[in-house]
Amino acid sequence: PHPDARPDPILEFEGVHLTTDDGVELLSGVDLEVCRGAITVVAGPSGAGKSTLLRLGNRLEVPSAGMVRFDGRDAATIDPRELRRRVGMVFQRPVLFAGTVRDNLRVADADADADDDRLAAALGRVGLDGAYLDRVGDDLSGGEAQRLCIARTLLTGPDVVLMDEPTSSVDPAARLVLED
């Protein structure tokens, strides 16, 4: 793009506040734009609200005031299931469903009858071999489970991927694969 061109935001936070039911203010007046094709990092100390901000991005939380927009639309007006397919979320602690790695991937795949080649390719993107498809999720290490969750999120074909410390439980070699 031209250096003077304004980036095209896909996710916007405008004057976002989040207060708990007992009056604790978690976020106050957050303004942020996440632009298409960009990598945006939110950094800060523990307890600063980074995870809360991410949860607002795909409507796992709803702002007390202000607005979250996705692709120019108020996120509150978008069906949560549709929004969560377009705004993927990878949590700091991996959340696996019962069953095999294949079962976990099929939960997210828009094509529920996806063949093993497609599922193995998703695993390959995160540095796992297709042989993992038959493994039971409970048998995975923390790092393997985290990479499975990233693969599962990518299978939905999201426009935005929100990641909350996605490499905290993976070894340095796997971290490089994920960063690539």
Image (tube, rainbow, N blue to C red):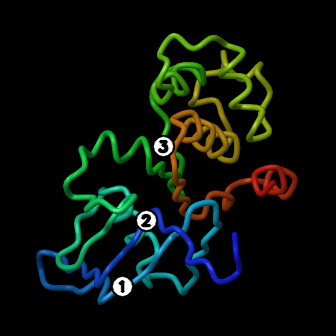
Residue closer to the observer: 135 or 147: 147
User: Tag 3's secondary structure?
Assistant: loop
Q: Is residue 75 above or below residue 120?
A: below
Q: CA distance from mark 1 to mark 2?
A: 13 Å
- Whole-percent x and y of residue 19? 20, 80
- The total number of labels drawn is 3
Q: Nearer the viewer, mark 1 or mark 2?
A: 2
Left or right: residue 52 compared with residue 134: left
Describe the element under mark 1 as helix, strand or loop. Answer: strand
Q: Which residue is mark 3?
A: 95
How far apart are the two marked residues, 3 and 2, measured between alpha carbons?
24 Å
Q: Residues within 10 Å of mark 3 (few under 14, many from 20)?
A: some
Q: Position of residue 142 (x, y in %)?
A: 65, 46
Instruction: Give, as a three-letter code, the residue at label 2.
Output: Leu
Camera-nearest label, 1 or 3? 1
Residue 23 position, x and y percent, is 14, 85
Q: Residue at x 39, y 84 (%)?
A: 31
Q: Position of residue 18 (x, y in %)?
A: 24, 78
- In the picture, measured across the screen, residue 171 lies left or right of residue 69, that is right
Q: Residue at x 78, y 32 (%)?
A: 124
Q: Which residue is mark 2?
A: 11
**Residue 117: quadrant of the picture:** top right
Q: Residue at x 27, y 63 (%)?
A: 61
Which residue has dot 1 on it? 30
Amino acid type at mark 1: Val
Secondary structure beneath dot 2 equals: strand
The CA distance from mark 1 to mark 3 is 28 Å
